Amino acid sequence: MPSGNVFPVTGELAASMRKATADLPPPSIDDGGQLAGWLQRHYRECVEGCAGIDRLRQAVERSLATTPGARGYLVLDCRELLDGVGDAEAITLLTALLTLVGTPMRVFDDWDLWKPLGTNTEVAPERATGVGYNPLHIDVVNSTMPPAYACLLCVREDPKGGGNSLIANLQNAVAKLDPQQVQYLSEPAYRDGSFYRLSGVGVELNPFPVLRRRPDGLWMVRFSAKMLPEMEPGPHQEAVRALERLLVAGQEEFLLGKDQVLIVNQRLVCHGRMPLGEGQSDIPPAQRRVLRQVFLTTP
């Protein structure tokens, strides 16, 4: 069980939500990759009418609002909610539930709304489907409009007990940088990854600044520790390494369990993953860890 910021969807709320969503049509997306507008409204109306929804709405607002005091993440414990529910029905139910936070969207055009993230021993260990340490980052860092929220559903835990989730507060870390480091991080000197067949995230931004002030006074932080190995030594690399050290020093770590959903506000926090348990190649592929990923946008 996560030891962090957890909201259990249980009791009256779980029962009411299952009843309210029992006859909902499955998710479909528009040409921009977002949940179709009529479905967004229909799903949200169904969820808003559920008994006990006020407690969940308050938890969402308290934890996920883009304000300095918010935790920046929330774990929804949906084990009771999803008990005995089939896969297709679970995706519909969870998609409806997430409309309380934002509009579900498909970023990667080659996948469904909920992208599967299995475990592959043949890819680079640091990748999302790899078996190693996945360092702290925000998703789609190299775009003009990274998704506001990233969500991960645990379908099956690692049989070896590894793969703890990592969360680190971006705003707190930036506040501890010195002015010279902030200056270097504000310059468009950073690159990460490729940009291919993506929707709803603007256009490619490579190179990009790690830091940019938002109109509300918070920092827009485009951080990914994955870019560090490719950087040339120098003050820009030193500045982003200083930011990484601050993030790691303040990170939270917990194991996401089956039927639990991690929601991350990417404007406040970044996320990562500890290595999976040793001996992944000994586990049959059909029994390895599986997550599903979906993103949320806001108006």
Image (cartoon, rainbow, N blue to C red):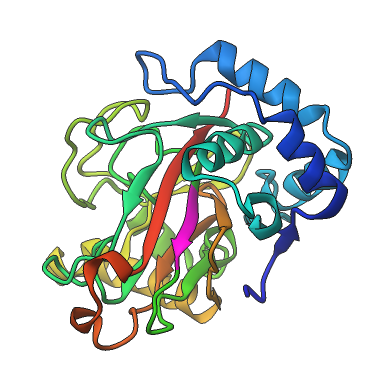
x and y percent of residue 154 in the render? 48, 60
Rendered-image quadrant of the N terminus: bottom right
Residue 143's image quarter?
Answer: top left
Q: Is residue 50 above or below residue 14?
A: above
Asked whether the viewer can see residue 137, the reply is: no
**Residue depicted at 20% across the width and 41% down the height:** 206
Residue 129 falls within the magenta-colored stretch: no
x and y percent of residue 81 in the render? 69, 50
Nearest to the observer: residue 288 or residue 244: 288
Total tally of numbered discs in the picture: 0
Asked whether the viewer can see residue 12, the reply is: yes
Residue 199's image quarter?
Answer: top left
The magenta stretch spans which residues?
151-156
**Residue depicted at 24% across the width and 87% down the height:** 279
Rendered-image quadrant of the C terminus: top right
x and y percent of residue 207 in the render? 21, 44
